[in-house]
Amino acid sequence: MDNIVRRIGILTSGGDAPGMNAAIRAAVRNCLQHNITPIGIHRGYNGLIQGDTFEMDARSVNNLSERGGTILYTARCKEFTTPEGVQQAVRTCKYAGIDGVIAIGGDGTFRGAQKLSAAGVNTVGVPATIDNDIGCSHYTIGFDTAANTAIQCIDKLSDTMQSHERASVVEVMGRHAGHLAVYVGLAVGATAILVPEFPVDFERDVIERIRQGKYRGKRHFLIIVAEGVGRCDEIARRIEEETGIDARVSILGHIQRGGAPSGRDRTMAARMGHTAVEELALGHTNLVVCYRDSHIVTIPIDEALAMKKGLDPYMYKVAYDISI
Ligand code: F6P
């Protein structure tokens, strides 16, 4: 067998993120530069198991960078966690002549990519999740757009909450990670930011901060809560009871995952999607494309999955020091 890559499959998996389409476009177009046929795979690893694949060309990704969501659809695939599921995916690759796969998504997507590589299909991962919680990469596609969406929503909320001198308890996405909450909280001037990574002393970190702010003449209080912390109703109730300030809850939800990607997400996605093809064209496998210290690099998936990314405590401190 020669080492020449002829057909590269592209899939998106896990929660969608703005910029996934821009990564697909870059991958498709760079495949064509290498005389490689790009193959779209629908619904993540499900499409590989079910043989739901189709040939793409330069025009099938026209005007795609600016579109949110993913034209390939996305899903989480339980079946792919079993050896039978992986073997079925390998059979699809053989049948469809796919000799490389680009898997765009988060940690779960990379665990799938690791299995596919181990089963003999060259695979490269591209990090895309609004949570920005991939240990190996300082940035993940979708984070900037999601943060800006949340910030715009909260700015609107602040207008009405300020008029009524209320407290807003706002839940942003992030079941296991508080990166979005801390970034958004700093940007909107939150009085308190609650994240799953840091334990909170509710009395000290929320109630007392509101009381002190009120004493200093502050009339509106924003409490940003990462989804993983939950209990927004309970938080609002306690604020009302213990400070006498009227409080309202807003859950931003999936609106944060939609919309046209920002310039940062489009360019990051283009660079990462392009790099994934470069690596596969060289016959490389079991890699994740990462953004580290202002450069796009690749790291073996096994190493990448072992890396952890903590919250930036300095960012948290800045948010607290200046929202008085
Ligand atoms: O991982 C991205 C994410 O948006 C998380 O922030 C959130 O907890 C989760 O996905 C929601 O998943 P689903 O769309 O399946 O409800």
Image: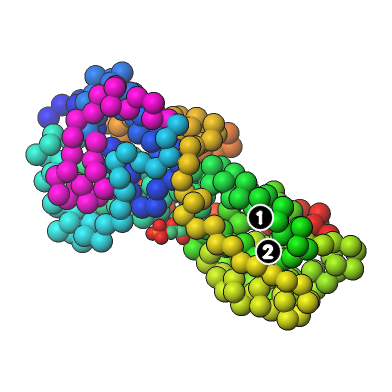
Instruction: From the viewer's perspective, tell me whether residue 86 is left or right of residue 240.
Output: left
Q: Tell me the CA gap for discs 1 and 2.
A: 8 Å
Q: Secondary structure at mark 2?
A: strand
Label 1 CB, ligand 1: below 8 Å? no
Highlighted range, magenta: 40-65
Asked if residue 234 is positioned above or below residue 152 in the image, the reply reads below
Q: Position of residue 17 (x, y in %)?
A: 44, 45
Of the 4 image quadrants, the one containing the C terminus is bottom right
- The residue at 79%/69% (across/down) is 210
Instruction: From the viewer's perspective, tell me whether residue 126 is left or right of residue 135.
Output: left
Question: Does 239 appear in magenta?
Answer: no
Q: In which quadrant of this rendering is ligand 1 seen?
A: bottom left
Q: Position of residue 6 (x, y in %)?
A: 19, 26
- The residue at 61%/57% (across/down) is 181
Of 111 and 77, the residue lying toward us: 77
Of 55 and 168, the residue lying toward us: 168
The residue wearing badge 1 is: 157
Whether pointer 1 and pointer 2 mark residues with C-beta atoms closer than 8 Å, the reply is yes
Q: Quadrant of residue 200?
A: bottom right
Q: Secondary structure at mark 1?
A: helix
Label 2 CB, ligand 1: below 8 Å? no
Mark earlier in primary sequence (1, 2):
1
Instruction: From the viewer's perspective, tell me whether residue 42 is left or right of residue 153.
Output: left
The residue wearing badge 2 is: 168
- Amino acid under label 2? Ser
- The residue at 17%/43% (across/down) is 52
Asked if residue 19 is positioned above or below residue 278 in the image, the reply reads below
- The residue at 53%/35% (across/down) is 262
Question: Does 62 appear in magenta?
Answer: yes
Q: Position of residue 272 (x, y in %)?
A: 43, 33
- Amino acid under label 1? Leu
Of the 4 image quadrants, the one containing the N terminus is top left
